[in-house]
Image: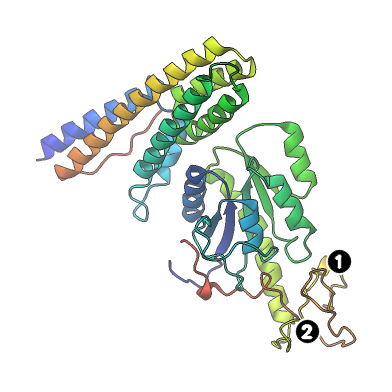
Amino acid sequence: MVMAAEPQFHVLAVDDSLFDRKLIERLLQKASCQVTTVDSGYKALEFLGLREGVEINDPDAVSTSPVIHQEVEVNLIITDYCMPSMTGYDLLKEVKESSACKNIPVVIMSSENVPARISRCLEEGAEEFFLKPVRLADLNKLKPHMMKTKLKNQKLEEIETPSKVESGTVAAVVEPESEVEPKQIYLQVVQQEEQTVSNNKRKSVEEGLSTHRSRPRFEGITTAV
Amino acid sequence: MDALVAQLQMQYRNYTVSLYQQGFLDDQFTELKKLQDDASPDFVAEVLSLFFEDCVKLIGNMARALDQTGTVDFSQVGASVHQLKGSSSSVGAKRVKGLCITFKEYCEANNYEGCVRCLQQVDIEFKALQTKLQDMFNLEKQIIQAGGKVPQVDIN
């Protein structure tokens, strides 16, 4: 895949059916996105850095990219609704409840047209609800959503000073401007086990990064293209 | 041999159109073809092959679930039917999808005979589709071997 200067969207696709994964992957590639597919909500959370668990060498890990906690930016999550153990709705909730990932747009797909299900998902924060089979035309609706997060990240890029937090245990997540004063970015305490309270007395603008919310570094991504 | 290519292309067009007209395929199949390009030249064939594998597996599940002497777990049958309905819908396998809809209703009604009938029909239908599509792919190969290009078929 050509690493062009134009924006490349990275989509995380979640579906327990191999067949559906193949389809959505091709659709997204055709729509010029980089795609990572995983076969469960748990694997998705791991990829996003929201959950520890499955080892990298797990033979059951079915994803087109290794499950690594590296700095990978995800611009959109598209997930099937009906999945064993963790449904798309459960995944949606987890993502929206995480301070790190809640701004990633989530799209739900389902083969069933159940209005109550659809409104539940939209209420929980899903951007769109697609009925399967998903088509290319549907994916074009997603570009504006992905553009939003991309622009937001770029904006953060411009504001931040390029200093990394010294100790590996201290990290914080920048809150989106809408919830904090738009002109400045403050350090926030993150509710994750491994984080410790960072020095938020300092008024200088600084951005600490957790593994999944980082500068866009497309050169390093080893996802399927 | 241009005459041969032209003839094969016409055959191919007619054959493809007939598949749509006879209800074997619907416009979702057309959508699938749109996803095939130089980057993914065998996409349709790969997807179809996965689909047919799915058919065999799921039909096997359904047959096993229906074969329980005693109580049949219709929800188990229904789960497989649901999956098959999904994949047939995604591939554009119109007749198979239609059968799955009926099949699902029989499952929900716990109608054993209805389910068994549907199972037999689904089996026949997917095999018929497989044969038809194989013929279509063979025509494509012949066109390419004769030096021609596979035409885009417009389904109206």
- The residue drawn where x is 78% and y is 40% is A120
Q: Identify whether B41 is placed above or below B62.
A: below
Q: Amino acid at mark 1?
A: Glu
Residue A193 position within the rendered picture, expressed as x and y whole percent measured from the top left: 79, 70
Residue B47 versus residue A145: which sits nearer the camera?
Answer: B47
| Location of residue B129 by image quarter | top left
Which chain letter goes with mark 1? A
Which chain letter goes with mark 2? A
Q: CA distance from mark 1 to mark 2?
A: 17 Å
| Location of residue B105 by image quarter | top right
Q: Identify whether A102 is placed above or below B100.
A: below
Q: Residue furthest front?
A: B70
| Residues beneath discs 1 and 2 located on the same chain | yes
Residue located beneath label 2 in the image: A206
Crowding at mark 2 (Cα within 10 Å: few <14, some 14-19, many 20+): many
Q: Amino acid at mark 2?
A: Glu
Residue A73 as seen in the image, left or right of residue A124: left
| Location of residue B126 by image quarter | top left
Residue A98 position within the rendered picture, expressed as x and y whole percent measured from the top left: 77, 61
Residue A81 as seen in the image, left or right of residue B14: right
Give the total of numbered labels.
2
Q: Residue furthest right?
A: A201
Residue located beneath label 1 in the image: A179
Residue A108 position within the rendered picture, expressed as x and y whole percent measured from the top left: 66, 45
- The residue drawn where x is 70% and y is 31% is A114
Residue B84 versus residue A73: which sits nearer the camera?
Answer: B84
Where the N terminus of chain A falls, by quadrant? bottom left
